Each structure stands twice: as C-alpha cells, then as structure tokens.
Amino acid sequence: MTEERFQYDDCGVDTNRAQDALGLLSGSINQTLKLRDGMSFGKPAIGLGYYANVCQLPGGQGLAISTDGVGTKIIVAELAGRYDTVPIDMIAMNVNDLLCVGAEPFALVDYLAVGEIDPAVFNEIGMGLLEGAKLSNVTIPGGEIAQVKELIRGHGDSSGLDIVGTAVGLVDWDKINLGQDVEADDVVVALGASGLHSNGFSLARSVLVDRAGLKLDEVVPELGCTLADELLKPTHIYVKPILAMRDAGLPLHALLHITGDGFCNMNRIRADVGFDLDNLPEPGPIYKLIQAKGQISEAEMYSVFNMGVGFCVVTPKAAADEIMAVAASHGFTAQVIGRATAEHPNIVRLCEQGLVGGKDRLSPEA
C-alpha cells in the first residue's frame, strides 16, 4: 500500500485561505498608497506584491523598503537551543528582497519579542545580527525589544521568541528594477542556496521530527551532520555578488529571490514573458530526505522549497559567463538553468519535472 502523501496544508499552513485573507487585507493597505499623491516625496513606485517597494525621495532617488522574519525556523532554534544563525536569516530575507528592486541595502532595524530576558540567548542573537550585518554591509541603527510572556510560547527550554526586521536601501528612481527589461531568450543564472533558507519549515519539521521521529541532535547519514546543523544553516546573503555585478556594469534585467512559492516567484516581474527552466540543479540531500520521509509530490516540493536555488539573475546570454564568474569569485555556485520566453507569459515551466505554474503554485503539466 502506498503511504499517504504529505502536504503543507497537513501541518496547519492553509495556503489557499492565506491568499484569500491577504486579498481582504490588501484592499485596505492599497488605499494607503495614494496618501502621498501630490507630495514632493514618499510616493510608492508600485503597488503591493513585489519583493520590496520604493518610495520617492527628493533629488531623483528612491528609498527601498522591505520587512520580514524567519517564520517557524525559530521553533527549530528553540528546540536546539541555538540562536546565532536565525538573526542572519532575518537579515538575509530582507536585504535579498531589496536587491530585487535594484537597491543597495544600507540599514536595518529589528524587533525582538521574548517571553523572558535570557542574557545567553541575547548574546547569541547579537552575534548573529553582527554577522548578518557584515555580510550585507548594513548598519543596525535601532530596534525594539518586547517582553510579551503572555503573548508567545516557547518550545523546548525556551520561553519563546520571535525576530523580525525592516531593511532600507537606496536606488535611483529611474533605475528601479522590476524586471521590465527582460526579453525573450534572456537566460536565467541561478545562484545556489545554502539549504532550506527560511521557508517551508512547518512542512520540514512536521515531516522530519513529528512524522519520521528524527532527533535534532542526531547525525543523519544522508546529511552527514546533525539534523539541527542542517536545518539551522543560515540563509545565503547575496548582497556582495549582486552589487559587484552591478558595479561591473553587467546587464541585470531581473533579480529574483527564490523564497516561499519557489520558482513561481519569477512570475512577479513586469515583463510580458514566462520562463522555461530545463537545467535545474540536482536537489541536495535535505530536499530528498524531506520528500522521501513525507512521500511528498514533486509539485509540492517545488512549490514550497527553493530546491537548491536561492537567487536568480536574468541577463542576456552573452553576459551569463561573466555573471557566473562574479558569483564564483564571491564563493557562490552558479549555473544557467533556463531562459525567458514570450510563448507563455507569466507562466514558469519546470521542463524536466513536468511542472507548470503561475503566481502561487506549481502543478503537473497537462
């Protein structure tokens, strides 16, 4: 008998309901975007839904802004009693999104909610914030700490914590990158991920810990390390290689952070194209382990996880080798994984996997 397949919804993440709720929330939020109309500064460049937004500044510049946390990866940190990497994740999730609009990140403020003050935990969080700031060349000029014992609950020995941040960057108003310059036959260069990054952890934890009974502190032969070591690998920060590409004058037609919804993120761009991805990297051991233990479909895996690709650069074919060389010089693996096409606008096809998707999820190609 075939074991029942596991899905994101089975671990309490109702993606369809989340989209419905977001639609209701965004109806009100969108009305605020007009409140700076006619003002000399502060007007947003675009509506909701891109990686980050940009607000107009005097002198022809724009202030890019993004906010994010790390989701239920925090639970793994609590259970493992290790807090030095999740601050790097939080910074990565913000600054990587700022890159996508062509901005250079320069500052971030954090919000840390805790059940109780633990000096040892705060020390680890501080080390992680410092490391993330160094990797992205941002300052942390302020933040907020809230003791909210009644509001949050911890896991393991933790009294509970959450960490989120808001990052800002600078971009010339006339150089905001929304992928509008992508043309058919541009190629997609993928920069490798360090692992799961900060998405899909409700599913990963449910499958590996709750369902398969793996212990965080045990060495998993397929991974060659403990489960905690693998799951708590910090999200790659792509600031230095992407800015080096920009400074070298390379054509960066679109910059794409591959996070929740996987490769469907690529359909956010403002060009009338889709993508055919026919050379995706072989998924690493962690993805194969999750899929095997949970009997998860290919469509679910590629809709929830990054599958080894953390960031994509869309560029003319002639520039691909130089893009990959810059990535390699900063220690990142890179390869061409596909191309843009005018044949199916706003659709991404994973050719070898037989999957196709729009803005939200992938499904088997008919």
Image (cartoon, helix red, strand yellow):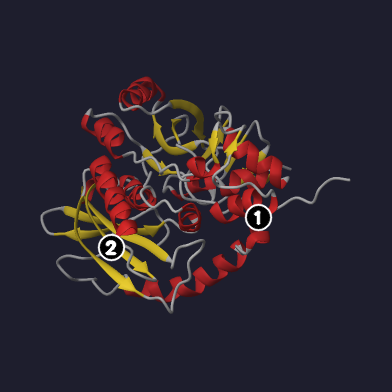
Name the residue tied to disc 1: 210
Given the current orientation, which residue lies at the most extreme bottom position?
150
Give above or below for 128 relative to 42.
Answer: above
Q: Amino acid at mark 1?
A: Asp
x and y, in percent, of residue 40 in the image = 14, 67
Q: Secondary structure at mark 2?
A: loop
Q: Would you identify the image quadrant in which residue 117 lies?
A: bottom left
Counting from the top left corner in percent of width and height, residue 149 is at 41, 76
Classify mark 1: helix, strand or loop: helix
The quadrant where residue 109 appears: bottom left
Residue extending farthest left = 59
Residue at 51% x, 45% y is 228
Q: Give the residue type at disc 2.
A: Pro
Count neighbours of disc 1 (C-alpha within 10 A) and say few if under 14, some if 14 to 19, many if 20 or more: few
195 over 167 or under it: above or below = above
Residue tagged 2:
44
Please give the name of the residue rendered at 38% of the width and 47% of the height, measured from the top-left corner.
Answer: 85
Quadrant of the frame with the C terminus: top right
Viewer-closest of 155 and 1: 155
State the quadrant of the N terminus. Answer: top right
Q: CA distance from mark 2 to mark 1?
A: 43 Å
Give the quadrant of residue 305: top right
Instruction: Using residue 28 as the reference point, say whether residue 308 is left or right of it.
Output: right
- For residue 352, above or below residue 70: above
Q: Is residue 103 visible?
A: no
Q: Which mark is residue 50?
A: none
Question: x and y percent of residue 25 in the render?
Answer: 46, 74
Answer with left or right where residue 10 lies relative to residue 251.
Answer: right
At 42% across and 26% down in the image, what residue appears?
333
